[in-house]
Amino acid sequence: MTRSYTRAEPDARRASLIAATAEVLGERGASGASVRTICARAGVSPGLLRHYFEGIDALIAETYRATGERVTIALADAVAGAGTDPRARLLAYVSASFRDPIADPRLLATWIAFWSLAKANPDMAALHAQVYGEYRAGLEALMAECGVPAGEVRLAAIALTALVDGLWLELCLAPEAVSAEDAATIAERWIAVLLG
């Protein structure tokens, strides 16, 4: 279905292009994310994309940033709601990945598109390193609050990131086999062993 073009405020048009890009990447993958398809989804003319972005690569990169920010906000909200206990804050940060808005099959498809682009595009690889680096930095800070020795915190954060990513993939791909509660329990047990 083709949407008719509409007039909107500049920030709204820019945001609609980013949202449309995330949807198209999730539905069609990186190879199906054309200017025409994205602009049709956003309800804007294809020429308008260049007004807001240098091209489709810049739009996809901005969509990756926006998606990363969405995840960061959800994680920060979870930590803020966990109170002051360091272990509870760490567990909240980790288990937030197993709930909405992060544990969403549509988001999984969008991340897969980003990952495929990161393998082929150095700029996307750098952005991927930044997004994941920020996530791990959050884990490292929370682990340090829990008393993980400074010399061990980096590798522990990498290991926990891998565990969370694996559980998140399983949850998004096979929610009938792995529930959010299962994933949180597995992560909690790993954290308990780490922290002693």
Image (cartoon, rainbow, N blue to C red):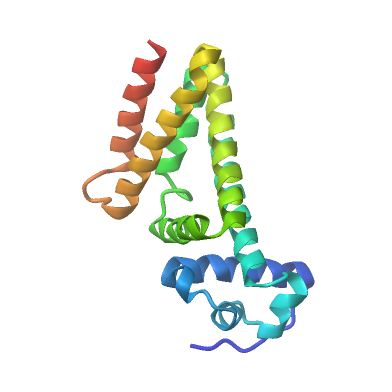
Q: Which residue is depicted at the point 39% across and 22% down?
A: 191
In the picture, which quadrant includes the C terminus? top left
Which one is nearer the viewer's eye here, 134 or 84?
A: 134
The x and y percentages for residue 87 are 47, 19
Please name the residue shown 61% across and 43% down the image. Answer: 130
- Residue 4 position, x and y percent, is 62, 89
- Quarter of image, res 179: top left
The image quarter containing residue 167 is top left
- Is 196 placed above or below 120 here? above
Q: Position of residue 175 (x, y in %)?
A: 28, 50
Residue under the point 78% across and 71% down:
10
User: Percent position (x, y) of residue 30?
Assistant: 48, 68
Instruction: Return the residue found at the far left.
Output: 177
Q: In the image shown, does 126 or 103 lie closer to the viewer? A: 126
On the question of residue 153 being in view, the answer is yes
Q: Can you say whether 6 is above or below 12 in the image?
A: below
The total of numbered circles placed on residues is 0
Give the side of residue 194 with respect to residue 139, left or right. Answer: left
Residue under the image location 60 percent in, 64 percent down: 60
Regarding residue 6, the answer to whether it shows in the image is: no
